[in-house]
Image (cartoon, rainbow, N blue to C red):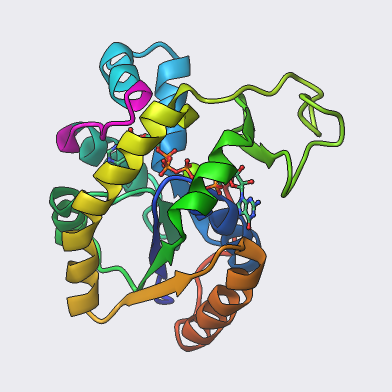
Amino acid sequence: MAKLFRAAIMGPPGSGKGTISKRIAQSFGLQYLSSGHYLREGIAANTETRVLVKTYIDRGMLVPDHVMTRLMLSKLEQLSGHSWLLDGFPRTLVQALALNNLYQLDIVISLNIPYETLKERLSDRWIHPASSRVYNMGFNPPRVQGKDDITGESLIQHDDDKPEALMARLRHYKEVAKPVIDLYKSQGILHSFSGTETDRIWPYINSLLSNKMHTLPLDAHQTQTP
Ligand code: G5P
Ligand code: MG
């Protein structure tokens, strides 16, 4: 059987993980799993963990490790036999070690984006809740203001993009990401990219993945965009 390709993308809130993941999924045919998307999907579906999860997200805090790990590992189990890309998981060392027990990642992409850039981006971000399509009023505005391009439905702003929640998310990210980054560095699979514009970072990521995948033949080329 062809070697499967397994990747993860890390970075602070608003660093472009979702934007870049969608480009990777489209260009390289990886299954794409976003932890934030699955959490919000659970909230919208009114599941039993809804209140717990919503409280954490609205405050810009991390959802407890056991909840996240159970959620994401069960999604990965359904993808056995496929190559995949994780966006937003693992976020903590506990999550990274749980993942490591089951899967060996081939590449981890880490995005380093200045704080001022993150603040500007997130205050301009609008979402189509049903599909998680993301717009930015400057970078990729919808064709009609306030409306999703595909369905024409109304766009919303997340509570966790408000300034107080955003500050908490950024602080938290730094603290918990360091040991995860150190782990992947020690495994020799960490690739960091710095800059203020996704369009300038993307060609480097594209070329890195093209090289890596050249040496790792892919399985079925399917794309799943949450
Ligand atoms: P999420 O949903 O994973 P965050 O906080 O990690 O959320 P977020 O906000 O989704 O990150 P992103 O995916 O890194 O950001 O970035 P993006 O959405 O692609 O881009 C941000 C905005 O900038 C968009 O409007 C985009 O169009 C625009 N943009 C992109 N590039 C450019 C550019 O070059 N220029 C300009 N001008 N704009 C650009 O997690 C949410 C919450 O869920 C919980 C936590 O509570 C978390 O806070 N959670 C977890 N908790 C515990 N463990 C985990 N593993 C968890 N995962 C999620
Ligand atoms: Mg995202």
Residue 142: quadrant of the picture: top right
Quadrant where the C terminus sits is top right
Type of secondary structure dominating the magenta stretch: loop
Estimate the x, y position of residue 195 in percent, counting from the top left. Answer: 53, 68
Residue 226 in view of the camera:
no
Q: Which is nearer the eye, 188 or 60?
A: 60
Give left or right: position of 23 versus 177: right
Quadrant where the N terminus sits is bottom left
Q: Which is nearer the eye, 114 or 98?
A: 114
Residue 7: quadrant of the picture: bottom left
Query: The magenta stretch spans which residues?
Result: 57-66
In the displayed structure, 210 sits above or below 90; it is below
Residue at 69 percent of width and 23 percent of height: 155
Residue at 30 percent of width and 17 percent of height: 55
Magenta region includes residue 184: no
Residue 57 in view of the camera:
yes
Residue at 24 percent of width and 66 percent of height: 181
Q: Which is nearer the eye, 169 or 73?
A: 169
Estimate the x, y position of residue 73 in percent, counting from the top left. Answer: 27, 45
Estimate the x, y position of residue 205 in percent, counting from the top left. Answer: 54, 74
Residue at 31 percent of width and 35 percent of height: 168
In the displayed structure, 105 sits above or below 137; it is below
In the displayed structure, 152 sits above or below 226; it is above
Q: Residue furthest front?
A: 116
Give left or right: position of 219 versus 61: right
